[in-house]
Amino acid sequence: MGTYRLLVAYDGSGFHGYASQRDVRTVQGTLEAALGPVTGMVETSVAGRTDAGVHATGQVVSFATDRDVDPAVVQRAVNARTGPEIAVLAAERADDEFHARFSATGRQYRYVVLNREAPDPFLAQTAWHVGTALDLDAMNAAVAPLVGEHDFASFCRKAEGRSTVRAVRWAWWRRHADRVELSVAATSFCHQMVRSIVAVAVDAGRGRLDPEDVPEILAARDRSAVRGAAPPHGLTLVAVAYPGSPLVRPDWVAATS
Amino acid sequence: MGTYRLLVAYDGSGFHGYASQRDVRTVQGTLEAALGPVTGMVETSVAGRTDAGVHATGQVVSFATDRDVDPAVVQRAVNARTGPEIAVLAAERADDEFHARFSATGRQYRYVVLNREAPDPFLAQTAWHVGTALDLDAMNAAVAPLVGEHDFASFCRKAEGRSTVRAVRWAWWRRHADRVELSVAATSFCHQMVRSIVAVAVDAGRGRLDPEDVPEILAARDRSAVRGAAPPHGLTLVAVAYPGSPLVRPDWVAATS
């Protein structure tokens, strides 16, 4: 009896996103079905409702149950039923006030672009393949103006009545062999925000967009100011922060970003 | 007009092995179908005929054609048709005597075991998940007696009339975070040889087999002396050697192995 907290990884390729929907396979639906036999029917909450095709290595899920179950038993039972596409990496009891979504103070994502001519069979589900050479400096110049608190309406899929003001803590690209990788963190992200930021940065890296135009795109507060969104499969939720356990900025992220 | 050499990577998960078979999807069949429009119908030869589920990052394929085609055009045409599961990483003209299989002087494989309790969704197709802690020293003690020239009949699926004598150049396991990885190289390997070596080593790592019994298993020259074979999906062909381009021993492989 009490509240439980799970650290979860999943390959989003085979799911219609995280959130439960009727008649389609979702991460939440699969997870709750696997929890049922050990915890009783539960309704889970989640730190980041990832879209179809998006992955997670550090998702956080919480739920309350009337049963008194050893967290290690919960972990093993779920892994036996959902593995290997979904893995519970850790399970523990949490305070009754703990809520995976509302207690979270930050979310960190990674976006990977495979930047070479030939595809890579082993990155097919986890990286966006861009065959033309990308200019890393232009990509970093494009994301720099986004750091800080802004209205990200230009980068968010519209949700009537919801604020699109967000605080981005860092956003930085690095090249790692034939991969170009973004690390980005914010208090929270609105829908399609990271993939829209990636679309703008990759356009800058390809020379199709001048990074100096980004402040104007941001100021427009208009979704049509950004052309589309990068494909979901390059995106991974890597970490969620809670009071007492902050995000860790990768050492390769520029301090000024 | 001439002989061509391709460096090929593939995720073997969706194929019934490398070699062409009627009515099933194979790497060779897919590759030759993609080559057809640019090279005309060709029959390819391959350095390592991998089994169903086995991967490659450094496979070598050769073929002869009457057409005079730019190798870069061959590479692009094949990648456009087979990507992302199969990728041609490089394409070049070769001497007319070059034959991917018969010219090869060495093959190097990697086998990856995920050694932790929870599964990893991102290694589901490329690592064998073993949940119980493995003893790395026992695993290295088990493979050490296999280095050198021996009759590997105990480790080979029987093929009537074919020699099972092979020269293993090195075999060594390392631990890398929650993964345990074998690097093994030989002039060539008989069918199921690497996976049988892995089965013996993992049995030793689990404490089910005494590494000191390995010389006896080898001396038996009897397939029934080895219990089964490790699953195919942990195995990857990483490199092939030809005269003038030898294998490169990873720096973490013990010099004595």
Image (cartoon, coloured by chain):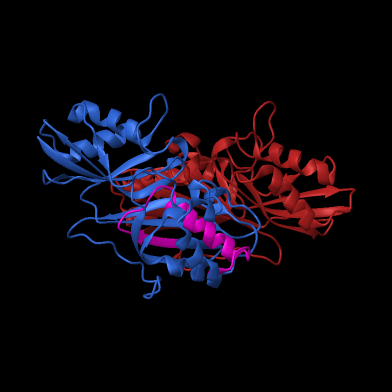
Chain colours: A blue, B red
**Residue A21 vertical position relative to residue A71 in the rendered view, above or below:** above
Task: Report the side of B172 relative to B8 (left or right).
Answer: left
Instruction: Please name the residue shown 82% across and 59% down the image.
Output: B95
Residue B63 x %, y %: 79, 48
> Looking at the image, how many numbered discs can be counted on the residues?
0
In the rendered view, does A140 fall on the left or right side of A242?
A: right
What are the residue bounds of the magenta stretch? A182-211
Which of these two is toward me, A23 or B193? Answer: A23
Q: Is residue B171 left or right of residue B162?
A: left
Residue A100 seen anywhere in this rendered image of the structure: yes
User: Based on the displayed image, in which of its 4 quarters is residue B246 positioned?
Assistant: bottom right
Magenta segment includes A209 = yes
Q: Nearer the viewer, residue B176 or B123?
A: B123
* In-front residue for pair B180/A197: A197
Q: State the residue in front, A187 or A61.
A: A187
Q: Position of residue B219 (x, y in %)?
A: 47, 45
In this rendering, the answer to whether A35 lies above or below B98 is above
Q: Inspect this view and state whether residue B99 appears.
A: no
Residue A112 horizontal/vertical position (percent): 49, 57
Residue B109 against residue A167 in the figure, above or below: above
Residue B200 counted in the magenta span: no
From this viewpoint, which residue is outermost toward the top? A23
In this picture, is A174 found above or below B218? below
Q: Residue at x 30, y 57 (%)?
A: A187
Direction from residue B147 to residue B92 in the image, left or right: right
Please give the name of the residue rendered at 53% of the width and 51% of the height, measured from the top-left corner.
A224
Q: Quadrant of residue A84?
A: top left
Q: Quadrant location of residue B242?
A: bottom right
Where does the image place residue A120, in percent across and percent down from the top left?
58, 52
